[in-house]
Amino acid sequence: MARKFFVGGNWKCNGTTEEVKKIIDTLNEGKLPPSDVVEVVVSPPYVFLPLVKTILRPDIHVSAQNCWVKKGGAYTGEVSAEMLVNLDVPWVILGHSERRLILNESNEFVGDKVAYALSKGLKVIACVGETLEQRESGSTLEVVAAQTKAIAEKVTDWTNIVIAYEPVWAIGTGKVATPEQAQEVHSQLRDWLQVNTSDEVAATTRIIYGGSVSGANCKVLAAQPDVDGFLVGGASLKPEFIDIINAATVKNV
């Protein structure tokens, strides 16, 4: 069974109400492939989730950028999975490198978050990726395998997980993994899933690429056999996000 192309837009900590409305206008007016060709999700900051849900076209879904590791309570500043479900937000991004590196979220903590979010009915974009130092030392696969293993140890059903491979050195830097580099890691990740989970999980789990994806490089990346889509940062705030979504049609040529 072919894996449906997946494009996520991570808006990170950006936007005002007026800017968000302009981004939504662009998305609502954009010509996109049908929903059986591509699944599109955008992830605004928490405060804009209700607004975006209200005015965004129905064939694009919304995602939160994070959620807490357990049920809510005395956790100042956190947002629980239950709250997202209550708002009818179907997706959440977990384990983004900015949270791993700046907020010191460990592999185990991310694994616990993924398992809890799934248990409450959320779908998860689970991020993995290596730093430049780790790549140059030849430990890329070791790093992403350890990050994935921490999730695999807590999860048995991968139906609602999308893995986002985001080399940290390519996020927001303008540097991008070559199509060959992206394909190599995606293929190795799929092999890891086959050995450590099951043939079915390896064959059906979508592994998307993130790291300075743009309108200029999206088609050649999308053409790689194990690249099942993108998690887009800065470009998801711009009109070229429409071009990136349309790269999904490369798979159907």
Image (cartoon, helix red, strand yellow):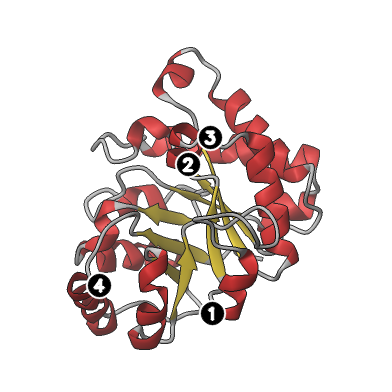
Q: Earlier in the sequence, mark 3 or mark 2?
A: 2
Kindly identify the amino acid type of the residue bearing the numbered disc 3. Val
Residue 100: % across, % down = 51, 36
Q: Residue furthest top?
A: 137
Kindly identify the amino acid type of the residue bearing the numbered disc 4. Val
The label shown at residue 20 is 4
Residue beneath disc 2: 99
The label shown at residue 185 is 3
Dots 2, 1 in contact, CB < 8 A: no
Kindly identify the amino acid type of the residue bearing the numbered disc 1. Leu
Instruction: Give left or right: position of 31 versus 120.
Output: left
The picture quadrant where one finds residue 18 is bottom left
Q: Earlier in the sequence, mark 4 or mark 2?
A: 4
Label 3 or label 2, whichever lies nearer to me, is 2
Residue 152: % across, % down = 75, 44
Residue beneath disc 1: 87
Q: Earlier in the sequence, mark 3 or mark 4?
A: 4
Q: Residues within 10 Å of mark 2 (few under 14, many from 20)?
A: some
